Image (cartoon, rainbow, N blue to C red):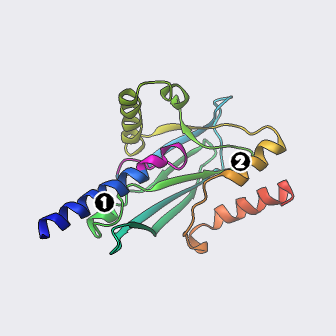
Amino acid sequence: MKRKMQNKIFVLLLCAFLLVLSLAATARPALALGPWKAQIVDAESKQPVNNVVVLAVWTKVTLVPEGSVNFYYYDSVETMADQEGRFTIAERDYSRFDAHVLAEPELFFFKPGYGQWRFQGEEIWLKLDADEKRKRYAEAGKLFGSTGVVIEMPPLKTREERARYYRDRIQPYGVPLEQKRAWLETDRVEREHLGL
């Protein structure tokens, strides 16, 4: 009976981990223990994009008696990309202290006038077969958590594009207000610009 319960817990944790990985199209996990390093560039001009708010959010996974999985905010780090579009988030391995905390953070990026981030070259990876696509994401994740990667953000050229992205973007829910001050200020500026 105990073995059966352990197997069930393992399967549920595996499912929870795979669910987090499935968010790869929006707020992708970084797939490493850090430090996470990147340079953010404009997807069209390839020029650095400065003052992008970068928010790394760690999540705790717990099982509830009914057998479902709950996700809770655990911790976060907020930083801004510098003049060259570069940022670093120091290594944090909470899983050493709490086995229920996912080792990789979800990463959120926001700058008014720019859309959803992607790894440089990612638009080509999406056309590859599943195995090759996984290899590319794994390699990018390793580089992100060591020497660094280039991240692209597509410019949004019209007010309508900006409003649609603002409305539909993935939000870092559960993060305490004091842990996302730059995010909130940037959000306020964009809301003002859009007349919301």
Residue 115's image quarter?
top right
Q: Is residue 16 above or below residue 100?
A: above
Residue of label 1: 13
Tell me if 24 is positioned left or right of 145 in this view.
Answer: right
- Read off the magenta span: 21-32
Task: Measure how far apart labels 1 and 2 are at the Cα level.
Answer: 32 Å
Badge 2: residue crowd in 10 Å (few <14, some 14–19, many ≥20): some
Classed neighbour count for the residue bearing mark 1: other residues with Cα under 10 Å, few (<14), some (14–19), many (≥20) = some
Which residue has dot 2 on it? Answer: 165
Query: Would residue 35 be seen by someone viewing this image from the given angle?
Result: no
Q: Give the mark, 1 or 2, whose residue is nearer the N terminus.
A: 1
Vertical side of 109 occupied by 191: above or below? below
Instruction: Judge whether 129 appears above or below 57 on screen.
Output: above
Query: Of residues 88 and 61, which is closer to you in this image?
Result: 61
Could you tell me which residue is drawn at 50 percent across and 63 percent down?
A: 77
Which dot, 1 or 2, sits closer to the camera?
1
Residue 89, horizontal then vertical, whole percent: 46, 55
Asked if residue 28 is among those painted magenta in the image, a careful observer would answer yes
**Would you say residue 3 is visible in this rendering?**
yes
- The stretch drawn in magenta includes residue 111: no
Most foreground residue, 125 or 141: 125
